[in-house]
Each structure stands twice: as C-alpha cells, then as structure tokens.
Image: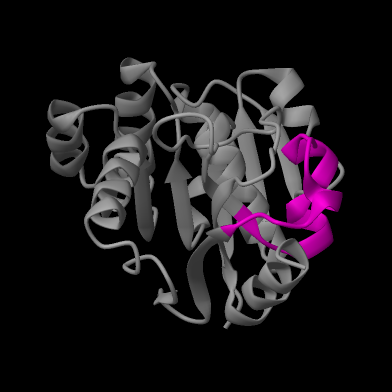
Amino acid sequence: MKQNYAVIGLGLFGSSIVNTLLEHDQEVLVIDKNEQRVNEFRDRATEAIVADTQNELALTQLGIGSFDNVFVAIGTDLEASIMTTMICEELGVKNLVCKAENARHVKVLEKLGADEVIQPERDMGQRIALHVMEPKILNDLKLKGELSVIEFELTNPKLFNKTLKELNLTNRYRISMIALSHADEDGAIIPNQSTITKPGDIVTIIGTEKDVEAFEATATA
C-alpha cells in the first residue's frame, strides 16, 4: 500500500531522504524555514512549504498528524528539533523518525515519543569501521524490502572529475551515493552535491537491487 511522507529539514540528510522517496514514486511533503532549500524541491515534491515547524498552528494546518511517516531531519538547531518532534507526537504522527546530533539528543527525542532516532554520522562511522575490519561486510548488504547497499571502485572514465550534481545519480540511475573514499586521501566521506569524483574512488551506493547492479555495471565499465 502506498504511503505518504513528510520531511522536515532539507539539509544533506533530509534532502537525501526526499530524493530516495521521490525515486520510488512516493508522495512527499517537504518543509523547511529556508526558502531556497524548499525551492530546490518545488517542482518534484508533492508539496513544498516554507514554514517554522516550531509553530504548532503551522503543522496543524499542514495536517502533519495525518501522515503515515514523518522525518524530522533538522540539523544543529536542537531546540527546533525537540519542539518539532514534540508537536508531531502531540498531533498523532503514526511513524516519527528523527535525526539526532548526539547521545543526549537521542535520549530526549526518544522520551518525546520518536519511533526511531538516527545519528547519521555515528551510524556511518560504525559502518565504515566495520568495513575496514571486514571489507566484504558492505558488499551485497540487503536492507528492508528490495534495497541493497554495495561498494566498489569507480573505474569508468566517463564518471571521473564530475560533481555529484552533474552526475545526477538520483534521476539518471535511481540510486544514492552514501559514502566515498578518494584513493589519495585517508578515510571516507559522506558526499554532497559538490563532491567531485576522481579515478580510483571507492563508492558506496544504495538503491533497489536492480538499480544498484545496473549502476555498478556502468560505473565499472
């Protein structure tokens, strides 16, 4: 059954969530107090709204309580994150997923009633550490549904020296890149739209099993 989603906060984390949902033809309401960020999704999201989500009336008027899933992806503004989470819970959101900045923030959000709390940097750090200990851990990792995560070396020259914005992976290949490691640098990074690919990059991508395999074939050709 198709569900509807709302994503509050359109930084790197929130935008990645939105792009993935849109790739899978979901109905998505996007909300941020920054008009420029909202405008980036105005032509693609079901609805794109500029609003201060600490305002209970604004979220009530948007009918946030009727959404099946709400992501509170607000970044470093802890007060806004906490207030938004509290209001969403009070309005009866069915499944509330929140981003946290630290362990204390996690505890607060859980006490407020968040169904799931995510620390992207911590979770990615754990994933990268596991991969260093056992390189094959990420390969063919199966997630819920049909989603898969795989890692491989980028060897197709056509994909070198491009920003992720230029590659347009979400729309062109229906996948998202969640980690990248340059051959001439130590450690991996969480890439953004301005990240530039280089020969020998090790990339980690997520998408449906079919789309992931198709992009790997293209990227390693």
- From the viewer's perspective, is residue 37 above or below residue 212? above
Which is more toward the observer, 72 or 58?
A: 72
Q: Is residue 120 magenta?
A: no
Residue 95 image position (x, y, % from top left)? 37, 59
Which is more toward the observer, 165 or 1?
A: 165
The residue segment tinted magenta is: 153-176
Left or right, residue 122 beside residue 77: left
Residue 21 image position (x, y, % from top left)? 62, 59
Quarter where residue 85 is shown: top left
Left or right, residue 92 beside residue 176: left
Left or right, residue 69 beside residue 97: right
Residue 7 image position (x, y, % from top left)? 55, 44
- From the viewer's perspective, is residue 139 above or below residue 94? below
Name the residue rendered at 69%, 38% in the picture. 198
Quarter where residue 144 is shown: bottom left
Name the residue rendered at 70%, 27% in the picture. 194
Which is more toward the observer, 24 or 79?
A: 24
Colour convention: one colour
- From the viewer's perspective, is residue 115 above or below residue 77? below
Q: Is residue 163 magenta?
A: yes
Name the residue rendered at 30%, 39% in the picture. 119
Residue 172 image position (x, y, % from top left)? 83, 59
Name the residue rendered at 59%, 32% in the picture. 10
**Can you see residue 209?**
yes
